[in-house]
Amino acid sequence: MPATLRGAAATDGIPFEPRWRRTERRKPQVMAICDVSGSVATYAKFLLMFLYAVQDVLPRTRSFAFSSALGEVTEWFKTLPVEEAVNSVNHRYGGATDYARAFTDFSELALNDINRATTVIILGDARNNDTDPRLDILAEIKGRCRRLIWLNPESRGAWGSGDSEMLRVIRHCHIAQECNNLKQLERIVDKLLADSRGS
């Protein structure tokens, strides 16, 4: 309104040329973070296939992998055949779990790139060997993104047992789901695609 009134001064206050507010429409993007540590060894390939599938259908996807140290593996999934990409990720990032280190690394690599058009997906069992997982960083990620989704390959009945931090993790997620079979995986990918088209 103020810009319209100023522009109308030359026409005795008649707003011949309305000035409309410009709104920036950000393109949706996905950041996917995959735990490939020993505690999810049974599911690691399954979870990495999820990353490969998401990056294949949603071009604005960045992929990360970790057990302790975290690194970006986006280019591996773009340039390597799926089996080679999965094996390379497991070889480079497999090991003992340290969510605190992984979240810290992610914060340094990509936190500033998260905005209200970003969906962050974390794939892991939230088992951290009874150490502090730095959920304060997870809370900061949630505060910046459009949606934070945690996909856990363990059954819900195991969440919170032993060294599982999942019951604390849930507080910092928009969605937390069990995901350990293709049917569940297909539903999640379909929802991501539908949300992307609707953005």
Image (cartoon, helix red, strand yellow):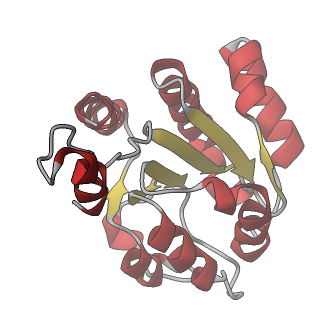
Q: Relative to the observer, which residue lies in front, 123 or 63?
A: 63
For the image, the number of numbered tags is 0
Identity of the residue drawn at 22% across and 33% down? 198
Identity of the residue drawn at 44% across and 42% down? 26
Q: Relative to the observer, which residue lies in front, 146 or 43?
A: 146
Question: Which quarter of the rendering shows the C terminus?
Answer: top left
Q: Relative to the observer, which residue lies in front, 75 or 48?
A: 75
Rendered position, 22 above or below 183: below
Farthest left residue? 14
Seen in the image, is 13 located left or right of residue 10?
left
Identity of the residue drawn at 41% across and 74% down? 159
Rendered position, 145 above or below 159: above
Q: Is residue 164 visible?
A: no
Rendered position, 188 above or below 70: above
Question: Which quarter of the rendering shows the N terminus?
Answer: bottom left
Q: Could you say where residue 192 lies in the image, as x and y percent from the top left?
A: 33, 36
Q: Could you say where residue 186 lies in the image, as x and y percent from the top left?
A: 31, 30
Rendered position, 124 above or below 23: below
Identity of the residue drawn at 21% across and 38% down? 17
Q: Relative to the observer, which residue lies in front, 135 or 44?
A: 135
Q: Could you say where residue 171 lies in the image, as x and y percent from the top left?
A: 38, 81
Q: Could you say where residue 18 lies in the image, as x and y percent from the top left?
A: 20, 43
Quadrant of residue 130 in the image?
bottom right
